[in-house]
Image: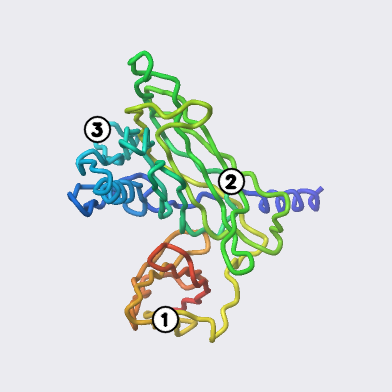
Amino acid sequence: MKKIYILSCALLAGTMSYGQTIPNGGMETWRNNTAGPVSAKPIHAPTNWYGADSLVIGIGQTLGTILGISPSVWKSQLFEESTVIHGGTRSAKLITVDQDTLGMFPGIMTNAKASVTISLAGLDNIKYSGGTPTNLRTRTVSAWVKYLPGKDSITGMFGGADTASMSIQALAFIGTKDSVVGSGFVRIAPNTAFTQVTANMVYRSDFDSNRYAIDTVRIVFASGGAGATSALDSSILYVDDVTMTGVTQTIINAVPAVTEGAEVVKVYPNPAKGILYLNGPANNKLEYTLYAVDGRQVAHQSVNGATSLAIGDLAAGTYLYAIADENGIIIQRGKVEVSK
């Protein structure tokens, strides 16, 4: 009986789900900027998150100069909200807007960087790069949301048949690039009070989890147009308290071996005590992020030439790092031992 009990505990431990911190998942801190080459407009985004405002306004104004469209028609769609909240003091507010020749455009917020192709025919494609690094195999992503559908173009009444969405991509480094190996999706129905929604991850049947490990998770929220209906004008999606769970992967260190000749940034010494030195190419800004084995971000440093990172406050142990370029694409991974 004792052996059976020990075996059961071992099996349970192998499938236990762990929470992983999503940087600024509570939408508490924000950054401000401007967008638009013709007429600068203020835009906002939560720290560690991105909207499509800079792309839509920037490309829209450029396109507008050719078509004779006023630069004032291109509108922001992602806003800092301090009144309608679930927890803390802030939430994110996404609004679907009629962006002139682009048509009805849903508000977008993502933890990855978005690039969009816009032509005379409107919006052609949205692509994403980067995301939240992870050392766990993601099982679920949850968020607290409130959704108010917009105005029906036929009846002119608010409360039409529109749904928002949350979509997830899990990526693994296979060959020479990150490949999408799992996905999750949930439609967000109208609700007048904050409701928690959860997307369950489904992985490709040909994904070899014994050989490759999930390294990045992308999360995208859209304020309308999910399902069979078109996006409705002025649909509003509030997002707060985004969380993620995952299980320990078979390959604990999902970082590929990096040879000396393949290093873009030299990271030393290893083991490190007190100070970690980062020596990268000059005039090429990179971002170095250090993570605990449970996925928590514990340190961050921009790299442009030779710099250093203070790690004296970190507990002794193994840490993983990711180095991303200016587009948020991870170009190098590695492991660092911290000693005391």
Residue type, numbered disc 2 = Ser
Which residue in the structure is indicated by mark 3?
A: 83
Which residue in the structure is indicated by mark 2?
A: 183
Q: Is residue 84 above or below residue 333?
A: above
Q: Mark 3 vs mark 2: which is more N-terminal?
A: 3
Q: Position of residue 123 (x, y in %)?
A: 41, 43
In the displayed structure image, the side of residue 278 where residue 34 appears, left or right: left
Which residue in the structure is indicated by mark 1?
A: 273
Question: Residue reaching furthest top?
Answer: 155
Q: Mark 2 vs mark 1: which is more N-terminal?
A: 2
Question: Which color scheme did the rendering employ for the protein?
Answer: rainbow
* Residue located 41% across and 53% down the image: 115
Q: Give the Cα distance between marks 3 and 2.
A: 32 Å
In terms of depth relative to the viewer, which is nearer, 258 or 112?
112
Residue type, numbered disc 1 = Lys
Which label sits in the foreground, 1 or 3? 3
* Residue located 22% across and 54% down the image: 37
The image quarter containing residue 90 is top left
